[in-house]
Image (cartoon, helix red, strand yellow):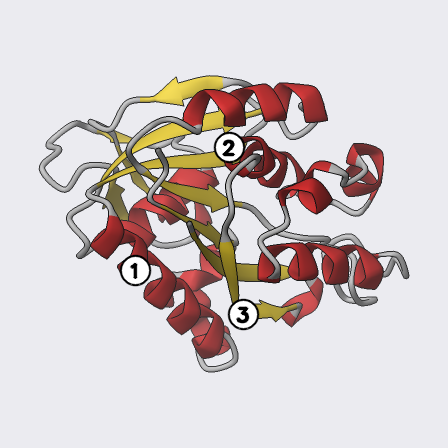
Amino acid sequence: MLSMVVVLPQPPLLVPELAGAAAAETADLRAACRAAAARLGAAASTWVAVGADAGGRRTVDPDTRGSFVGFGADVVVALDPSSTAPVDPDLPLPLLVAGWAAAGTGARIRGELVAPDASPRECAELGASLAGEPVGLLVVGDGSAKHTLKAPGHLDERSGPFDDAVAAALRDADPAALAALDPELGRELWAIGRAPWQVLAGATAGRSWTGELLYSGAPYGVGYHVAVWTP
């Protein structure tokens, strides 16, 4: 059974080499991500990382490496610290972030990707298939990208209530609240984390969890949440 769940966002600016002038402003977010990943590494040496990608549903083998070069810096990450595989220039962002977060933990990661528009039912079914695995679960995805006028998606007043509800569900370890997120609203708010969070809901349903919200905010107009769930 799952030993622990960690939820992270996926902004490339988590990587100091990519953060530039934003490095100081995002230091608290970065520290929260590092702390959560360290806890997951202490709980499990094997992780399953769940994220959303336009390529749709697929599994990514641990013997995979990727690079943030497409985001401005050739920072190479590995899903298995022992991997010597060629660098995949197209490794999806959530798995790049998973590899970055796992650095130094010794964890070996299998990626499970879903389409951003995967239905709640599809997400729940994938989650249920992961629930019995003796691994740590890393769930990667952002909240709404429409919190301010200067946000990537500009301002949508529904962003605040949406991400407040996500933060509360993560704080309270409430799978039912995550399962109830409206996929159409998530799409309209550019919340790429909606599908991965609903995989989380399917993976944790039926067990009692304690939630900790380590970070919740919207720097640069995008909602980011960091949480740890322990059984």
Residue matched to label 3: 215
Q: Is residue 55 left or right of residue 59?
A: right
Name the amino acid type tagged 2.
Ala
Sequence-first tag of 1 and 2: 1
| Kind of residue indicated by mark 1 | Arg
Choose top left, top right, bottom left or bottom right for residue 23: bottom left
How far is the residue under mark 1 from the one under mark 2? 19 Å
Q: Earlier in the sequence, mark 2 or mark 3?
A: 2
Q: Please tell me how crowded label 1 is: few (under 14), some (14-19), or many (20+) other residues with Cα within 10 Å.
A: some
The residue under the point 90% across, 61% down is 157
* Rendered location of residue 47, percent (x, y): 30, 38
Amino acid type at circle 3 is: Tyr
Residue 97, can we see it? Answer: yes
Quick one: label 2, few (<14), some, or many (20+) residues within 10 Å? many
In the foreground, 125 or 176? 176
* Helix, strand or loop for disc 3: strand
Tag shown at residue 118:
none
Q: Secondary structure at mark 2?
A: helix
* Image mark for residue 203: 2
Q: CA distance from mark 1 to mark 3?
A: 15 Å
